[in-house]
Amino acid sequence: MKLQLAKGVNDIAPQEKLLQNKVIKIIKDEFESFGFMPLETPIIERYDTLAAKFGAGAGSDVLKETFKFEDQGKRKLGLRFELTTSLARFVAMNPTLKMPFKRYEMGPNFRDGPIKLGRSRQFWQCDCDTLGSNSMVCEAEQIAILSRVFRKLDFDFEIKINNRKILNGILNQAGIKKQKDAIIAIDKLDKIGVKGVSQELVDRGYTQKQIDQVFKIIGTGVSVSSLKKKIKDEEGARGISEIEELFSYLEKFGVGEVKYDVSLARGQAYYTGTVVEVFLKNSKITSSIAGGGRYDDMIGGFLGGGRVVPAVGVSFGIVPIMQALIEKSDELVKTPAQVLVIPLNTTLKSLEIANDLRKRGINVDFSLKKGVSKNLSYANSLGIKFAIIVGEDEVKARKVNLRDMKSGDEQKLSLLQAAKVIENAS
C-alpha cells in the first residue's frame, strides 16, 4: 500500500503548528479585546442547510465545491465550507439569544475546489460576527481587528472595501434584474479580467448593452466621489452613504490600509451591504487572506416569518496567512520548550526541578537520553535556548548548571536565579 494524502490537504508539522497556534492566539486575543464571545458548531451540516437560498445559494460557486455525502439513514449531509451558515443556523435554533450577539469561532472548513498556493481543500478559518445591529460601527470594529492582527504579524497588506448596494445600483441602472449571477461573475474581475467577466456575463444570458453599461462604471481606480456623480439609483446611493460613514469610523480607529474597490463583490449570494477582503502586497500569495461583509437577510431566512436580523462578520484564512508567514520566515520555532533539564544520576531531584520551573510558567523538556553531549545535540537540533544540567554535586550545593545553548556559556546558579535568566531571555 502506497501511503498518500487526499488531494488538496496537508499535514501540519510541529514547527508549523506552533506558528499556527501563535497566529490563532493573536486573532483570539483581538476578538476578545473587542468583546466577542466563543462558539463552536459542527463540521457536518445537513445539506439543505448549506444549500438554503438565504445561505450560499444554489447557484454559487462555493456550493458546487461542497463535499456531499449521506449517513446510514440516507440523510443528505455536507462538510461546512465556512462558518457563517452554521452561525445562522445556530441563531435560528436559539431564538432567545440576547442581541446584539457578538461571537467568534475558529475551526476547519472544506471546499472541493481548485488548489493553488494559499488555497487548499481543508482550511482553518477564524471568524467574528456581530448580529442584531445595523450600525456601521460593527463593520468598523471588525475591519479594525483585521488591521490590528496583520500589523502584529508584520504584513504589508491592503484592505479592499465595497458595498453590495452600490453594485446592485450599478446593475439596476444597466437594466439587469437577475443580479446574483451577475455579481458572482463580477467578483472574478481581478482573476479573469474584463474580457473574462464579459464572456461569463454573456454565457449567463446578459445582453451586450447591459454589459457595456456595467463596465462604464466598474473599472480600476474608481473612487467613491466619482460614483456619486454616476449612480442615480436609490439603492446605490444608500450604499455610497454607508461607505462614506464607514470610512469616517475607520479613520477614528486609526485604520489606514483601506482602499475602495468598486468591483469587489465576494462570491456568496447572501451579502447585502459592506464587503471586505484583505490582500498581501509583494507576496506570492495572491488569494485573499481575510474577508467578510454584511448579510442582513440570511439569519431571518432561517428563522422564517419575514424576520430580518442584521448581521456582519469577517473571517481570517489561516492557510494563506501561514503560507505567507513561512514565506517570509528565516527559521520556524521547532519546540515550545525554553529549557531542557538533563539529569546525571539525579532523576528524582531533576524531575522536581523541572516541575518547579513549570510552576513558574517556563516550558520544560526533560531529557530521555543518556549522556550530556547527546542531550546538548538534541537541544541544539530543536533550537532550545537553555539546558539545565543537574549532577550530584549540583544537588549537594543546591545549585543547577545553566548552559546558554547559543553561546555555550555555563553558570552555577540557584534554581531561582536560573529561572530568572530563562524568563528574561524569553
Image: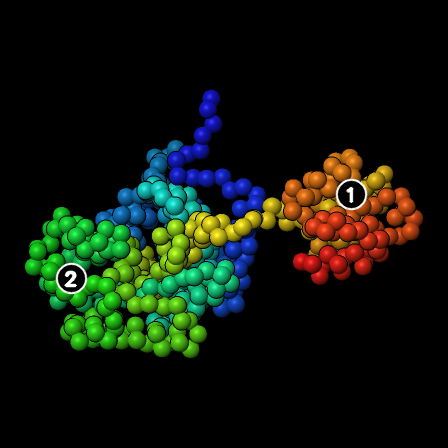
Q: Which mark is residue 342?
A: 1
- Residue 196 lies, in percent from the top left, at 19, 50
Q: Is residue 80 visible?
A: no
**Crowding near pointer 2: few (<14 within 10 Å), some, many (20+)?**
some
Determine the secondary structure under disc 1.
Answer: strand
Amino acid at the residue labelled 2: Phe
Q: Quadrant of residue 211?
A: bottom left
- Residue 310 lies, in percent from the top left, at 34, 66
- Residue 353 lies, in percent from the top left, at 80, 50
Residue drawn where x is 18% and y is 55% of the image: 194
Which residue carries the number 2 mark? Answer: 215
- Residue 207 lies, in percent from the top left, at 8, 55
Q: Is residue 417 left or right of residue 230?
A: right
Determine the secondary structure under disc 2.
Answer: helix
Residue drawn where x is 25% and y is 71% of the image: 223
Amino acid at the residue labelled 1: Ile
Question: Residue at the top extreme?
Answer: 1
Question: Residue at the right extreme?
Answer: 396
Against 374, residue 42 (above or below) is below
